[in-house]
Every structure is written in structure tokens, then in C-alpha cells.
Amino acid sequence: MKVAKIYKIYIDAGHGGSSPGAVGKDGTKEKDLVLERALGIAKGLEKYEGVEVKLSRKTDVTKSLAQRCKEATAWKADLFWSEHTNASSQSSPNGFDTHIAKNAYAKTVELQKVIHKHLAKVWKDAGRADRGYKRNNFYVLVNTPTANAILVENGFITNSTDLSLLKNKQFVQKLIDASVAGIVEWFDLKPKKVNTVPELPKAQPKDTEIYKVKKGENLTVIAKKHKTTLQQLLKLNPQITNPNLIHINQEIYIPIQKKKVIRQHVFVNGKQVGIYGEKDKIEIKKVETWE
Ligand SMILES: [Zn+2]
């Protein structure tokens, strides 16, 4: 059996704790904006198989750049994603850019192309600037040797329009979705198979009734309870491809149980005058009389 490669993705929410990063006019801190997006990217990646995700921080804690890089490298991260928001001494600069190391791996250059393309769509749709592909030897880009490392600067906290976008839930989600889409495209990730409940076939087999699976039951248990076999249940329910995977409340066909008939012979004066069957003393199946 082929063992699929598990990609390790390290999502670094920039700054944190005693390092607020850039601060907006209204007091908004970069560390909070980037944490929201980093958590969103990690959550978005949960929908895909073949990935493991680690965050540099999940809360507002202080962590040095060296700690982040050591952690990602010891873990052998395949991707190091550093999430930031830019700042300027002037209020006009706006939009986004992406950064990789000056001597980045060829695969990292490809990574930047893909990620940049996805983020550019979101920023351009909002009428903001695409500031381009950048090469910078930022600490996290040159101290993460196992990884293809990228740093994204999403928006300017010092630009009022960017700031309002970065505080807008819908816009933030668009950035998160674009980031996830870029990562998914670059690694060629496949969505996790959703455990859907197979639908009951429209054509009901003869002499069957619909049964709702109860908690803790498997097909073998159900077969035993209804005096049939696992094979018979699978035959009646071709929608079940894995007998070990049935769901609570899933509807399946089960054979109608033959009513148990107890034969009662009726005697009058020692002479048999009748015969009938009954089930649970309720249903009289047949009465026959002699003479
Ligand atoms: Zn930053």
C-alpha cells in the first residue's frame, strides 16, 4: 500500500505578547489581526487530507523569532508561512506584498507565485494595491532551512481603508480563504472525504421494512437481532459499501420477520374440532372446523 506523504505546515502569526507589531491610529494591534488570520488558515486546512498544521502561537503570547524558527525546523516543516500586516510612516501606502528569501529555493519561488496570485485577487477586488513579489532576507525566511518559507504582508495598519478592511470579518475570511486556496494549490491537497450517510435505494426489495440504525449497532448486531445474516443485509442494502461504517439513524432495509405461529389444536369431547395459530395470543391465523 502506498503511504501518502504528510506535509507539515507551520503557520506563524507574527509578533504576540509583549511585541504588538505595528499599531493603528485606533489602537488596533498587528499581533491581534495576524493571529485571527493565522487561526483561520489553520482551521481552513483541517478540511484537507495529507497535512499537519502547527501554529507558532494560538494566543497572545511572546515568542522570539529564533524560537519560532527552531521549532519549525526541529519539526521539519515543509512550509513556513509568516502572517503579517504592514505599516508605514505615511498614510497612503496600501495593499499587500509577499516576501521570500533572496536565495530562496526554486520551489519557494513557485510557492510565492501561487500564493501571490490568490491574495492579489482579494486585494485588487477591494481596489487596493498589489505591491508585488519581494525578496528580503527576513529572519524567518533564512532560518527555516527545511521549509519553503514565505512572509505575507496583508494590508497597511497605517492606512485607514486597509485598516477597516482588516477589521471586517468578511474581508478577513476572504484573505484566509485565498491563503488556504494558495497552499492547497501549491501542495495539490485533496479535500477530506466527508462521511456522508448513503441514501436508501428507492426500489424497496420485497418482504422488507425500513429500519433505523440505533446507537452502538453494527450490521452484524442488527442481523442477529432480526434473525437474518450480514450477507442478507448487504444484499438488501447495496448502498452500504463498508459494513463497518454505518451511521446512527441511517435507514436500511431489513427482512420482515416471519410471524411465529403457534399451532393450537382445539378438542371437544376428545375430538379435534379445530386448529388455529396465534402469535402473541393476539392474531388468530386460521380456524378450521370439522364436521
Ligand atoms: Zn509584522
Image (tube, rainbow, N blue to C red):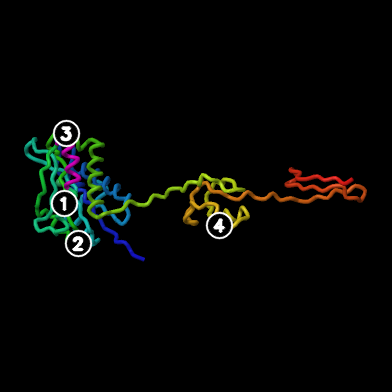
Q: Amino acid at mark 3?
A: Asp
Q: Are marks 3 and 4 in contact (CB under 8 Å)?
A: no
For label 4, the SS is helix
Q: Residue at x 14, y 55 (%)?
A: 109
Crowd rating for badge 2 (residues with CA inside 10 Å; few <14, some 14–19, many 20+): some
Q: Are marks 4 and 1 in contact (CB under 8 Å)?
A: no
- Which residue was labeled with disc 3? 26
Q: Which mark is residue 146?
A: 2
Of the residues under marks 2 and 3, which one precedes in the sequence? Answer: 3
Q: Are marks 3 and 1 in contact (CB under 8 Å)?
A: no
Q: CA distance from mark 4 to mark 2?
A: 49 Å
The picture places residue 37, in percent across and down from the top left corner, at 24, 44
Looking at the rendered image, the disc whose residue lies closer to the viewer, 4 or 2, is 4
- Residue range corresponding to the magenta coloring: 116-127
Looking at the rendered image, the disc whose residue lies closer to the viewer, 2 or 3, is 2
Looking at the rendered image, the disc whose residue lies closer to the viewer, 3 or 4, is 4
Q: CA distance from mark 2 to mark 3?
A: 39 Å
Residue 170 higher or lower than 46, as above or below: above
| Figure quadrant of the N terminus | bottom left
- Which residue was labeled with disc 4? 220
- Which residue was labeled with disc 1? 112
Asked if the stretch drawn in magenta spans residue 272, the answer is: no
